[in-house]
Amino acid sequence: MRLERRRFVQLLGAAALAGAQPGPRYALVIKNGEVFDPSRGFRAKADVAVTAGRIAAIEPEIPAEQALETIEAKGLYVAPGLVDLHTHCYHSATGLSVEADPIAARSGVTTWADAGSFAHDQVAGFRRFIVEPAQARIFGYVYLYPSSRNPDIDPIDYARRQMRATGQAVLHNRDILLGVKVQIGSNMNGRYSYDLLKVARELCDEYKVPLMTHISFAPPETEQVMELMRPGDIVTHCYNGHTLSITDPNGKLKPGVAEARARGVIFDVGHGLGSFNFAAARRALDAGFPPDTISTDLYNLNVNGPVYDMPTTMSKFLYLGMSFEEVLRRSTWIPARVINRLEGMGTLAPGAPADIALLELEEGEFRLVDSQRNAVTARQRIVSRVTIVRGRRLRAT
Ligand SMILES: [Zn+2]
């Protein structure tokens, strides 16, 4: 690939010197696929050309001779690279995380957001050893409550002492950090949960950064959490099926939930080992409450099931009756807007970064399993065939 690049640059130079000499204009052309870009409502059979890591052209026919490399995409959708807003790819002491690139290569996920696997004192390691070496694009939410805490210090007092360093870490690393993550639920930070959320609220107000909140088991109650969420904040595990959930057992949205969405709070799937339930998702969809963003909450306890990857998680929403376009929009354009760090991310518009997923919509009978091991049989499944990041094809190694 490196040799090819050098040759391409030489060719470009030679062509410039010789005027309009014929020769490859593009580094890569994806031929004969169906381009599907929900950000622009664009869907058509077309060829896609890539040069210098960006989308150079989308035209009905781009001759293969105009490219140094071609990829045949007949029968495939050519979609913006998938954007997974909730993953765990920082390797902390918990040992839970997964490595992004090998999974990106097989799953079409070109952009990853780590949802709080690291605290402010680990940001340098996140940048140096996770973000920089990766081919996939990686961002992160910093966790407010480091695990290396002194057991003699009151947890809320301890979290308060971390506010300044946490807020400044986000501000000083805005190219890779998106906000602050907290875990709220009686099973996660226990009786300190609600007070921890208040500390996080104060911190995010002071530093004007988004807050991503994990929800699982009450207390606190859903309404108490919702009223502390501001526009641009994210509620993850929105279809968890537990007691700190967005619907009641009768299928009604709990107080504060619709109001939170109306003022711009983002509701994220964050499937995970324990946080996606088919019945809970069905109740919310029936109540007119689709997710804003579809994400995996991928880590090594669920990567071999029931989550597997982003296409499998997306397939669960096809099963629940959402259209392919709506599923794709919530897995590309909307999470890219939440991240909001790179113009054109989540689209295939000419000039946008060449982050591309070649997806296939398979027909058949597929077993899909939620976090409580409820299994369903789906008639369609999304599978990724090729992942391209910054114009380069990722290969599973
Ligand atoms: Zn998570």
Image (cartoon, rainbow, N blue to C red):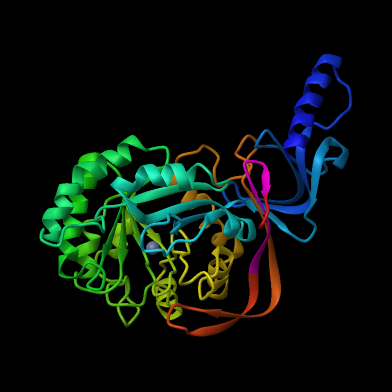
Image coordinates of residue 91 in percent, x first then y, are: 42, 56
Vertical side of 177 occupied by 330: above or below? below
Residue 264 visible in the snapshot: no
Image coordinates of residue 129 in percent, x first then y, are: 46, 46
Residue under the point 61% across and 56% down: 108
Question: Which quadrant does ligand 1 occupy?
Answer: bottom left
Vertical side of 263 occupied by 65: above or below? above
Residue under the point 64% across and 42% down: 354
Q: Is 392 contained in the magenta span?
A: yes
Q: Is 267 contained in the magenta span?
A: no
Image coordinates of residue 141 in percent, x first then y, are: 36, 50
Residue under the point 83% across and 20% down: 14
> Looking at the rendering, which quadrant does residue 52 occupy?
top right
**Horizontal side, residue 61 vs residue 256: left or right:** right
Image coordinates of residue 254 in percent, x first then y, are: 27, 71
Q: Quadrant of the C terminus?
A: bottom right
> Looking at the rendering, which quadrant does residue 351 occupy?
top right
Q: Nearer the viewer, residue 33 or 213?
A: 213
Residue range of the region highlighted in magenta in the rendering: 382-393
Residue under the point 21% across and 44% down: 205
Q: Nearer the viewer, residue 305 or 127?
A: 127
Q: Nearer the viewer, residue 150 or 116?
A: 150
Magenta stretch, main secondary structure class:
strand
**Horizontal side, residue 173 vs residue 19: left or right:** left
Residue 267 visible in the snapshot: yes
